[in-house]
Image (spheres, rainbow, N blue to C red):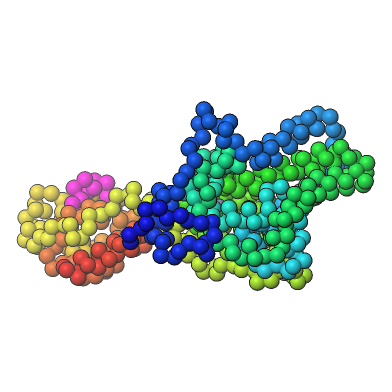
């Protein structure tokens, strides 16, 4: 496709002309969209995003000062832990699973509750947060991903907010959010909402409740807010860096117990990137995922509906594919018998002649060189010597002794030729050694093999 030399991609997906989006959208956009110069030791202080930096760095400084001067009371400690879940649910069940991914439908009441609670996390408005998160999913691990994990742990955790973004996040469709009255309302009143939920309420409850104004501010407000910040940030850093990739290993998202604990249940991140429209992150009933249980409970009391789940069949298929890939890697480092079509075909007379100079045995149409094995044969060398130059098929397959699978596999490694007219067609059980009954074969090899067998 011929592309105009300078196509501009707007934030608004509705304004992107469909024909102007090429197949290699990411590389095309990265090439044609202007980027700010990289952050270096010479320019970093000019590139600081002062608003984000103030929100992220001033509270920890205040917290350190506060911790030195404020004793922790039991009431305040319990209040801090309990209240910590309020904005955490707002972000997890609201910002993330309701607005960014539309994994369920919430009643207006629940939408307002989540919008207010989420503001208390002080992570920006729903509109800003969900827009960046949709770009993260759509352009994961590329420069159009606002928290691209390939730029390092620090960048994906917090660096992407401390400095002015080098480029705009890739376009994502946010028309639903733009038309959502709750999202618009929260965006408009974001600052008073955030201040009220993050500072006023936690401080006032401890102050009016048991007279601990200072503790309420230091623990239930500052400490809780910093914890929720870094808990959320860990989804972009820890969960793209540490753990397993059981459902797809193409991109960086990972599942780990540490990720699950520090993110309060958002750490089944490999699953989440594979199945983002699933309201669960931990899809098994026993997976620690408080937001999943919260949404499920909301459905039971009529506040949520249309909870979306991916079919277990598709989840298992994804998991099996990765497992087969790992098995294939184990398979590839092992030595296997020479392929049938690579073996020379010899006549019975040739076999007889060659068996006079070395220990050759014919079993199931294959000629095996057992010279180095005769003396190691568990049944004794005599049984083998008796069969040199003969057809030992019946003796090997139970006539004398019914050999183990390991013996079959070992024998197949000693194949040196095929007897003309001696090998049964197809995949006779005697011809295919047990170790290859379940061999993992790539789809393109299947095609190549079928073409080969059609030709032969
Ligand atoms: Zn997500
Ligand atoms: Zn992610």
Q: Going 50% across and 67% down the picture, which residue do you hit?
A: 314
Q: Position of residue 194 (x, y in %)?
A: 76, 49
Q: Is residue 376 within the magenta segment?
A: yes
Residue 158, by quadrant, is top right
In the image, what residue occupies the spot 48% across and 47% down? 143
Where is residue 196 drawn, in percent x and y? Answer: 81, 49
9 to 147, vertically: above or below: below
The quarter in which the C terminus is drawn is: bottom left
Q: In this rendered view, identify the residue nearer to me: 367 or 381.
A: 367
Look at 80% across and 45% down and name the residue there.
199
Give the left or right position of residue 205, taking residue 123 as reference: right
Front in this rendered view, residue 367 or 273? 273
Q: Quadrant of residue 349?
A: bottom left
For residue 140: magenta? Answer: no
- The residue shown at (79%, 43%) is 221
Residue toward you, 341 or 68? 68
Is 400 on the left-hand or right-hand side of 365? right
Left/right of residue 196 with respect to residue 428 in the rendered view:
right
- What span is in magenta? 368-377
**Residue 283 in view:** no
């Amino acid at each position: 496709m011929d592309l105009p030399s300078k196509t501009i991609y707007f934030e608004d997906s509705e304004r992107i002309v469909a024909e102007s989006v090429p197949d290699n959208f990411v590389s095309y956009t990265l090439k044609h969209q202007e980027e700010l110069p990289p952050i270096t030791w010479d320019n970093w202080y000019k590139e600081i995003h002062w608003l984000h930096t103030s929100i992220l760095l001033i509270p920890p400084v205040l917290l350190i000062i506060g911790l030195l001067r404020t004793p922790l009371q039991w009431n305040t400690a319990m209040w801090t832990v309990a209240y910590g879940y309020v904005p955490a649910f707002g972000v997890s069940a609201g910002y993330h699973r309701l607005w960014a991914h539309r994994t369920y439908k919430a009643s207006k009441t629940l939408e307002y509750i989540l919008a207010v609670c989420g503001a208390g996390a002080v992570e920006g408005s729903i509109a800003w947060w969900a827009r960046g998160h949709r770009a993260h999913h759509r352009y994961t691990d590329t420069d159009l991903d606002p928290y691209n994990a390939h730029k390092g742990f620090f960048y994906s955790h917090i660096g992407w907010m401390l400095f002015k973004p080098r480029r705009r996040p890739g376009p994502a469709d946010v028309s639903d959010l733009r038309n959502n009255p709750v999202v618009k309302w929260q965006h408009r009143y974001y600052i008073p909402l955030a201040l009220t939920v993050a500072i006023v309420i936690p401080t006032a409850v401890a102050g009016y409740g048991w007279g601990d104004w200072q503790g309420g501010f230091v623990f239930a407000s500052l400490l809780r807010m910093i914890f929720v910040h870094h808990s959320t940030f860990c989804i972009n850093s820890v969960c793209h860096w540490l753990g397993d990739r059981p459902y797809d290993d193409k991109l960086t998202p990972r599942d780990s117990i540490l990720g699950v604990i520090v993110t309060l249940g958002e750490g089944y991140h490999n699953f989440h990137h594979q199945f983002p429209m699933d309201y669960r992150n931990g899809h098994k009933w026993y997976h620690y995922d408080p937001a999943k249980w919260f949404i499920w409970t909301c459905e039971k009391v009529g506040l949520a509906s249309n909870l979306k789940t991916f079919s277990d069949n598709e989840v298992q298929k994804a998991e099996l594919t990765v497992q087969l890939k790992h098995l294939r890697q184990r398979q590839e480092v092992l030595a296997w018998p020479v392929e049938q079509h690579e073996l020379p075909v010899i006549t019975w007379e040739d076999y007889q002649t060659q068996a006079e100079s070395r220990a050759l045995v014919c079993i199931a149409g294959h000629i095996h060189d057992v010279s180095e094995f005769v003396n190691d044969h568990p049944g004794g060398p005599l049984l083998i010597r008796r069969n040199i130059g003969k057809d030992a098929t019946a003796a090997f397959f139970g006539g004398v002794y019914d050999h183990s699978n390991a013996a079959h596999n070992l024998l197949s490694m000693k194949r040196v030729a095929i007897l003309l007219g001696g090998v049964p067609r197809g995949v006779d059980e005697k011809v295919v050694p047990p170790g290859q009954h379940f061999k993992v074969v790539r789809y393109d090899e299947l095609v190549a093999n079928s073409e080969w067998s059609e030709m032969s």
